[in-house]
Amino acid sequence: MDTSRPADRRKLKEYEKLRHRMVEEQLISRGIRDPLVLRAFRIVPREFFVPSFLKNSAYKDAPLPIGRGQTISQPYIVARMMEMLELSGAERVLEVGTGSGYQTALLSHCCDVLYSIDRIEAFVKKARKALDSIGLFKPFLYTGDGSLGYPSKAPYDRIIVSAAAPLLPRPLIDQLAEGGVLVMPVGDEWGQKLVRAVRKEGEIIVEKNEGCLFVPLIGEGGWKEP
Ligand code: SAM
């Protein structure tokens, strides 16, 4: 977009309105209360992270395709998972499943240091461009098998995985700092539960939450490549 053009400026204003409506109608009305999360959703322009032919659907209450059989998740589910992380803004975070980079952008407003990894290099490159275009240079992006975590920067205060695994991947648990929290979908291809695991005094406390449906985490700690 060229913000010196009145038509583009008008379009940005329209998206801004839709974004604020999304926060009210899709997030607050469903119980999302974390001020840090709500602030991030009010700031980050989702239209920069969806394919250009879907820009007008950017604020729909739904996941949208981003290519290669993958999706940018429904805003509510992203907000719910981020709220479960209980971020204060000071954490070192690992995100597995960069995808479009939308959740990366949201997270970068809610933590101190952010590492994000996706197995598909094209997504990482595209996400980097989208993040740069809105001035978010902070997140470190990598290509690789995030089901193994990213050991060289571990431990992490928070880990969030936006693809589903049959079990909590052991490497991710091992890379959690004391007091750290891991949030991810766990189950089979037909449906999963949002699981929150906390490392407390050496023990891992696991809590299962509501049902969800995510694309599979493909890798050593997830599912085999189809
Ligand atoms: N959070 C993303 C967003 O905001 O657009 C959506 C993520 S999409 C639902 C799931 C992503 O997980 C895909 O981009 C896919 O390539 C990635 N993925 C699947 N298995 C992975 C693995 N082992 N390591 C890293 N990324 C993986």
Image (tube, grey):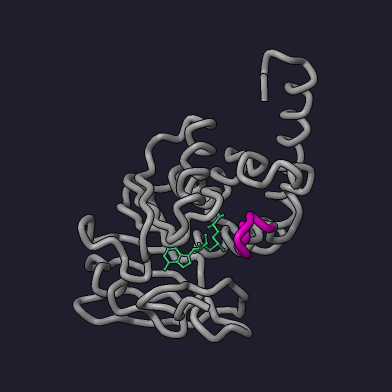
Residue drawn at x 75%, y 47% is 54
Q: Nearer the viewer, residue 177 or 219?
A: 219
Residue drawn at x 23%, y 63% is 151
Within the image, what quadrant is residue 160 found in? bottom left
Report the side of 44 relative to 14 (left or right): left
Q: Nearer the viewer, residue 52 or 6?
A: 52
- Position of 34 relative to 220 (above/below): above
Type of secondary structure dominating the magenta stretch: strand
Would residue 70 be counted in the magenta stretch?
Answer: yes
Would residue 68 be counted in the magenta stretch?
Answer: yes
Report the side of 160 relative to 56 (left or right): left
Report the side of 125 relative to 188 (left or right): left
The magenta segment: 65-72
Position in image of residue 68 (x %, y %): 60, 61
Residue drawn at x 37%, y 70% is 147
Position in image of residue 5 (x %, y %): 73, 15
- Position of 216 relative to 33 (above/below): below
Report the side of 26 relative to 188 (left or right): right
Residue 35 visible to an observer of this rendering: no
Residue drawn at x 71%, y 35% is 16
Q: How many marks?
A: 0
Within the image, what quadrant is residue 222 found in? bottom left
Position in image of residue 52 (x %, y %): 71, 41
Residue 4 visible to an observer of this rendering: yes
Q: Residue furthest front?
A: 226
Position in image of residue 195 (x %, y %): 47, 77
- Position of 188 relative to 83 (above/below): below
Q: Nearer the viewer, residue 108 or 20?
A: 108
